[in-house]
Image (tube, rainbow, N blue to C red):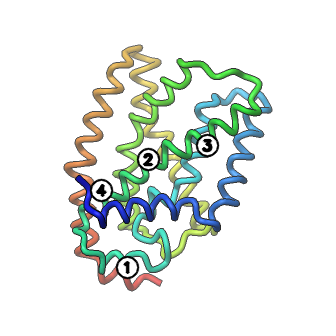
Amino acid sequence: MPTRRETMLFAMELRQCFSAKRVPVFILLILIAIFLVVQESELSPMFVVFLAVFAILESQFNNILFRSPHELEALSLFSLPWERIVLVKNVASIVLLGIVTVIVSMSMLYFSPAQPTWSMIVDGLVYSSTIIFPLLHIGNRESVQAPRRSSEWEINDIVQAAGMFLFVCVLSFPYILFTIVFKMQWLNFVYAIIAGWFWLTRSIPRTALSIESLKTQLCAIL
C-alpha cells in the first residue's frame, strides 16, 4: 500500500502537469491535432493522438527531477527512498498518459469526420502497452544524463520533444512487427510484460542509484 508521502507526491505530479503555465501548450497541441484530423490526411488518427499526447507529456517522462526549478532539492528532503520516488513519478506518468489521451481523443473526435471504432480503441491500448515501459526507461535515463532546471518550451525543450518523437517511432517497431508483419497480436502482450519487468526490476533501481551518486552534481546545475 502507498504511504501518505507517496500519495502526496503522486497528487503533486498530477497537479503540476496541469499547472497554469502548461495549459496554453496543451491547447495549442490539441488544436494542431484537430487540424491534422480535420484535413483528412493519410495520418492515422491514433498516430495523431499519441503524437500530441507525448509532446504534451515530454517533460513528465524526460525531466522527472526538475518538474519545477528546485524540485530535486525539495525531493532530497522528502523522507522517501529515491527508488520509491522514481516509481511514484513513473506511475503518475502512466496515469497521466491515460488522462491526456482521453482528453486529446475526445477533443479530436468531436471535430473528426470519421467515427471511432472499438477496433481503433483496442489497437490504441495495445500499442501504448508496447511503448510505455521502454519510454519510461529512456525517460529515466535522460532525466539523469540531461536534466533541465526549467522546462517551459524553450529551444532545448522543443529539441527534447523532437527527440522523444524519434524514440516513439523507434519503439513502435515491435508493435508494427507483431501486428502487421507477423499478424500475431498476442506477442504484443508478451513484449509488454517483459518490458514492464525490465522497467520495474532494472530501470527504477538503476535510476535511483544514479540520482543518489550524482545528487550533489545535479543540484548544482544552473
The residue at which mark 2 appears reads as 95
- x and y percentages locating residue 9 in the rendered image: 37, 65
The answer to whether residue 11 is left or right of residue 50 is left
> Residue shown at 36%/54% (left/top)?
90
Q: Quadrant of residue 118?
A: top right
The residue positioned farthest toward the front in the image shown: 4
Mark 2 vs mark 4, foreground winner is: 2
- x and y percentages locating residue 15 in the rendered image: 51, 62
The answer to whether residue 24 is left or right of residue 208 is right
Residue 12 numbered mark, or none: none
- x and y percentages locating residue 40 in the rendered image: 76, 27
Classify 10 Å Cα crowding around label 3: few (below 14), some (14-19), many (20 and above). Answer: few
Classify 10 Å Cα crowding around label 2: few (below 14), some (14-19), many (20 and above). Answer: some
**Distance between the alpha carbons at the discs numbered 2 and 3:** 13 Å
For marks 2 and 4, the one nearer the N-term is 4
Q: Amino acid at mark 3?
A: Ile
Label 4: state its secondary structure.
helix
The residue at which mark 3 appears reads as 103
Label 2: state its secondary structure.
helix
**Distance between the alpha carbons at the discs numbered 1 and 2:** 23 Å
Residue 87 numbered mark, or none: 4
Mark 4 vs mark 3, foreground winner is: 3
Q: Amino acid at mark 1?
A: Ala
